Amino acid sequence: MKYVLSGSLGHINKPLAQQLIAAGHQVTIISSNAERQAAITALGADAAIGSVEDTVFLSDVFAGADAVFTLIPPAHNPEHWKESIHGIGKNFAAAIKTSGVKKVVNLSSIGAHMPDGCGPVSGLHFAEQELNKLNGVDIKHLRPGFFYTNLLTAIGMIKHAGIYGNNYGAGNPIVLTHPNDIAKVAAEELLNLDFTGHSIRYVASDERTSTEITSALGAPIGKPNLPYVEFTDEQSLNGMLQAGLPKEIAVNYAEMGSAARSGEMFADYKKHPVELGATKLEDFAKDFATAYSAK
C-alpha cells in the first residue's frame, strides 16, 4: 500500500510513519522544510518537499496513493488564522479530487462541530466541510482533544510566576490526548481502511480538570502546592500578548479557552463513546518534569 502523510515529522507523523513502514508499506511524507529530507529518508520514507499552499504539488504527490493523511500544519503568523486553515482544507480537497484518491484520514480537533466561537478549531470545522464535499471519497475525521505537549508552554509561567493558569475554568473536565495515542488511532484507520462515507472518530487519552492538571504537573517538579489561577478571557489574551504571541493567534486561543470553559467545545464529544488511550496525565507529567528541568 502507498500512503502519503502531510505534516512533516512532527509528534504525530513520526510515530505514524514508523508504524506504517514497520507494517511493510510505502510512505511519502510531505514537508515544507528541505532540511527535513534527510530525517525522512532515514526513517525509511520518501520525502516530498513543497507547500500545502500549492495544489499542483499536492495533486502530484497524492497521485497513485491508496490513502492520504491530511494534517494542517501549525500557523506561524497568519493574518486571518481561521480563513488560512479553511484555505488549506480547500487545497487538500482540490488535490484529492484531481489525484483520484479514494481514502482519506483527516486530522481535525475536538470542537470542530463549532463553525464559530472556538478559535482555530472553527477553521478546522470548515476544512472538514471542504473534504466532505468530495463525492466518492471515504473520509475519517479524527478529532483529538488538547495535546499534552501543549502543556509544555506552561513551563515559563510556572518558572516566572509560580502559577499555572488559563481561561478554561477550574473544575471543567478538559479532554487531553497524547500524540502517540493519535498516531496509533491514525495507523489503525489507515491500515484497515474499512471506513466508508464521511465519519468522525474522537481520540482521547484522559479527562481532567485544570486544577487536577496543575497538581499533576506540580508534583514531579517539586511544587505539590502549585496554585491554579483561573484567568478571565481578557487576562488570558493580555497574558499571551505580553508573552509575545501575535495578536491573531492570541485572540483565537483566548476564544478557544472560552469555548472550553463553557463546555461547548466538548458537547459533541460527549455524544460519542470513546475508549481512552494508554497515556494518562501522570505519564505525561514525567516528560513535563524532564522538559521543566532542562529549561
Image (cartoon, rainbow, N blue to C red):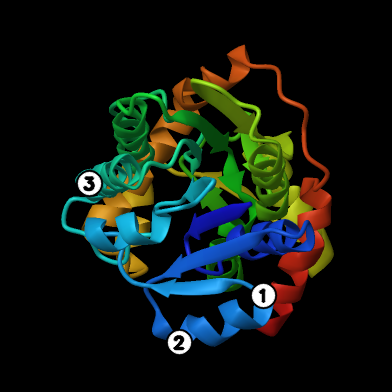
Looking at the rendered image, the quarter that the C terminus falls into is bottom right
Is residue 235 visible to the viewer in this orientation of the structure? no
Is residue 80 depicted above or below 161 in this figure? above
Q: Position of residue 23 (x, y in %)?
A: 78, 56
Answer with left or right where residue 246 lies relative to residue 151: left
Front-most of residues 104 and 169 = 104
Is residue 280 depicted above or below 268 in this figure? below
For the residue labelled by badge 3, is the local secondary structure a helix, a strand or a loop? helix
The residue at 51%/66% (across/down) is 29
Image mark for residue 8: none
User: Which quadrant would residue 219 be assigned to in this image?
Assistant: bottom right
User: Which quadrant would residue 94 be assigned to in this image?
Assistant: top left
Question: Around disc 3, counting alpha carbons within 10 Å, would you say few (fewer than 14), some (14 to 19), or many (20 or more)?
Answer: many
- Of labels 2 and 1, earlier in sequence is 2
Image mark for residue 87: 3
CB atoms of marks 3 and 1 within 8 Å? no
Q: Which residue is mark 1?
A: 44
